[in-house]
């Protein structure tokens, strides 16, 4: 039986996808180009041709090149605007002058959770996106100037930080706001998770490049699953597992997706993989129940 992570090639007939994803898994994090990697991942979600001449005529290649050119132009404009930016405040001002004021990038609050807003190609073309895609634009643009910028581990709302001089600034790329105090950060957290939520040290911790890419993919996965597009949720899940094979919790959701689409052998394999690697007994109950239903070929309409 094939493993869940071996099934990508059967679903997406683009050999380069598999190589790119496994390279993300094996490349030292500091060597991952965040902007370029996010663009390539975004390209995987665009309609593509299987023509032998696709490398020349495939529309997605033209769109990718347009986006790469745009990132280069952003870097050039920021270099001119922020040539004397010695601290974090001046650097963020230069970034905002170009990305926000000159180019008009915005968080799209009207349809915040649709899949296209996590897609960097769509974000560049529309000048609207979710916090992660916009945050990548800021981080990538800052790094082209040699400035220190990174995502933070804040839950369910993507924040970035810029360092410079003696300053560290936390910035919300979706709303275009600086978060100046712990009180403001706590208020944002409580607005997302309720009054009982409290700040934890990991919410301030820098994210690795790989973690940011995985966050984009996980947002896409959850969006597709919530809208009932389980075939797409499966594909995104398989991508994640190629980039981060030890994401054991994901095997549970993947098993449920497979089961609900009738791929029972793959569902059992995914659920067994999950049960073999997750030690929390309380989290086992649903996975065990679903696996038993599969083995007895019971009705799956009661999974959720």
Image: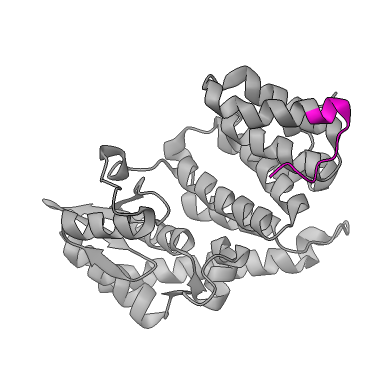
Residue 39 percent location from the top left of the image: 58, 58
In which image quadrant can residue 89 be found? Answer: bottom left
Is 249 rendered above or below residue 38?
A: above
Q: Is residue 133 left or right of residue 116?
A: left
Quadrant of the snapshot with the N terminus: top right
Q: Is residue 39 magenta?
A: no
Is 135 rendered above or below residue 299?
A: below
What secondary structure do most residues of the magenta stretch adopt?
loop
Residue 164 percent location from the top left of the image: 18, 53
Quadrant of the snapshot with the C terminus: top right
Q: Is residue 113 left or right of residue 145?
A: right
Residue 254 percent location from the top left of the image: 69, 38
In which image quadrant can residue 170 be found? Answer: bottom left
Residue 281 seen in render: yes
Residue at 66 percent across and 42 percent down: it is 237
Residue 147 seen in render: no
Residue at 72 percent across and 39 percent down: it is 256
For the residue pair 302 and 183, the one nearer the viewer reads as: 302
Q: Is residue 277 left or right of residue 94?
A: right
Residue at 71 percent across and 65 percent down: it is 60
Is 97 rendered above or below residue 51?
A: below
For the residue pair 170 and 95, the one nearer the viewer reads as: 170
For the residue pair 38 and 282, the one nearer the viewer reads as: 282
Q: Range of the magenta residues?
A: 293-304
């Amino acid at each position: 039986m094939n493993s869940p992570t071996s099934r990508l090639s059967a679903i997406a007939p683009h050999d380069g996808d598999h190589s790119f994803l496994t390279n993300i898994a094996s490349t030292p994090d500091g060597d991952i180009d965040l902007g370029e990697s996010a663009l390539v991942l975004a390209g995987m979600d665009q309609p593509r041709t299987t023509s032998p001449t696709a490398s020349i005529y495939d529309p997605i290649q033209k769109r990718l090149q347009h986006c790469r050119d745009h990132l280069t132009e952003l870097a050039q404009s920021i270099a001119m605007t922020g040539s004397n930016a010695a601290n974090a405040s001046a650097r963020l001002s230069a970034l905002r002058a170009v990305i926000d004021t000159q180019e008009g990038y915005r968080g799209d609050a009207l349809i915040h959770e649709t899949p296209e807003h996590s897609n960097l190609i769509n974000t560049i073309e529309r000048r609207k996106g979710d916090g992660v895609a916009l945050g990548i634009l800021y981080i990538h643009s800052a790094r082209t100037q040699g400035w220190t910028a990174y995502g933070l581990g804040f839950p369910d709302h993507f924040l970035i930080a810029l360092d410079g001089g003696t300053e560290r600034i936390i910035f919300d790329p979706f709303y275009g706001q600086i978060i100046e105090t712990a009180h403001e950060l706590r208020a944002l957290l409580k607005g997302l998770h309720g009054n009982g939520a409290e700040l934890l040290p990991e919410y301030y911790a820098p994210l690795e490049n790989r973690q940011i890419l995985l966050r984009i993919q996980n947002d896409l996965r959850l969006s597709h699953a919530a809208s009932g597009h389980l075939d797409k949720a499966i594909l995104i899940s398989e991508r994640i597992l190629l980039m981060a094979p030890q994401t054991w919790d994901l095997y549970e959701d993947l098993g449920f997706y497979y089961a609900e689409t009738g791929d029972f052998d793959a569902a059992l394999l995914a659920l067994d993989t999950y049960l073999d690697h997750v030690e929390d007994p309380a989290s086992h109950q649903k996975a065990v129940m679903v696996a038993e239903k599969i083995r007895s070929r019971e009705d799956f309409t009661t999974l959720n």
